[in-house]
Amino acid sequence: MTETDSITTDVLIHAPIERVWTLVTSPEHLGRWFADAGAEVDLRPGGALSLTWGDHGTVRGRVEVVEPPRRFAFRWHTAPQVDDDPTPANSTLADFAFAAEGDSTRLVVTESGFDGLATGAQERTALLADHTRGWQLELAELAADATATRA
Amino acid sequence: MTATLDDRAPVVFAALADRTRWSLLGMIAERGEATATTLALGLPVTRPAVIKHLTVLDEAGLVTRRRVGREVRYRVDPEPLGATGQQLADVAAAWGTRLAALKDLAEQEPA
């Protein structure tokens, strides 16, 4: 990962690791501190995930890692209302690492894959340009046909 | 949390709101690097018109240019379409807010 590809932040929570694990991975809690209008989580690798915000809509994703109580990770789209499978071009990875510190829990969160979004944007640009050129060619042929038949 | 564009967004969108400029970006992306002359050959547009479009793209930060001998060569700069340092700072700030909310929830509610 390069400097532009990820961010990492952490928090020390004065609660046991099992409690923090539950709050991070269960849909009824995820939909309160992360999203604000609900969440769905199929808690296994490859499971579907969705996060809903009142003013933003529903963002879909996929669970990637479930290793209680130490590690949880999911991919999520960068925009709401996208139903396609999450890929490195349209989603980022949110990775949660839990460690006990006495009676408290250190939670380290890394969100990564931002460079992949830029690459995805370049590919989408090339693809859109291809389609645009395709239409331009077809329209040029149509114009040529129309002109020829009028003659 | 979306990786949103920053204050340059209107300039970037205006630069992209033109079919020829989209085509130019795509052609440059495919080649990696291209000159205005090469690009004009691939489009039903004159070379001076291509240069005008490239200037708009350059000012929006969507392409970078370098001089090699007598040629000026253009490359796509994906940064306006992807995440910038400011956007990453926004992402980090969003996580800070979320984790503070999680901490409150974990520490205040009965288990």
Image: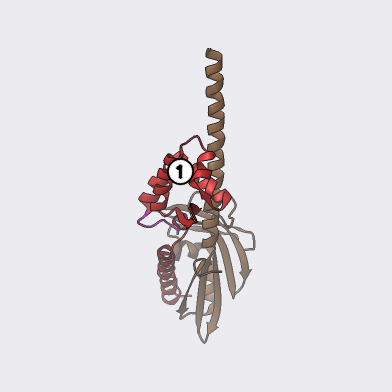
Q: Is residue A82 visible?
A: no
Answer with left or right where residue A18 lies relative to residue B95: right
Residue denoted by label 1: B21
Question: Coloring scheme of the render?
Answer: by chain
Magenta part, dominant SS: loop
Residue B105, image x, y percentages = 43, 72
Letter of the chain in red: B
Q: Which residues are magenta?
A: B2-8
The magenta stretch spans residue A147? no
Please tell me which residue lies in front, A147 or A85: A147
Please tell me which residue lies in front, A149 or A45: A149
Residue A67, image x, y percentages = 63, 72
User: How packed is label 1: few (under 14 Cα within 10 Å), some, or many (20 or more)?
Assistant: some
Quarter of the picture holding the N terminus of chain A = bottom right
For mark 1, give the secondary structure: helix
Outermost residue, top direction? Answer: A151
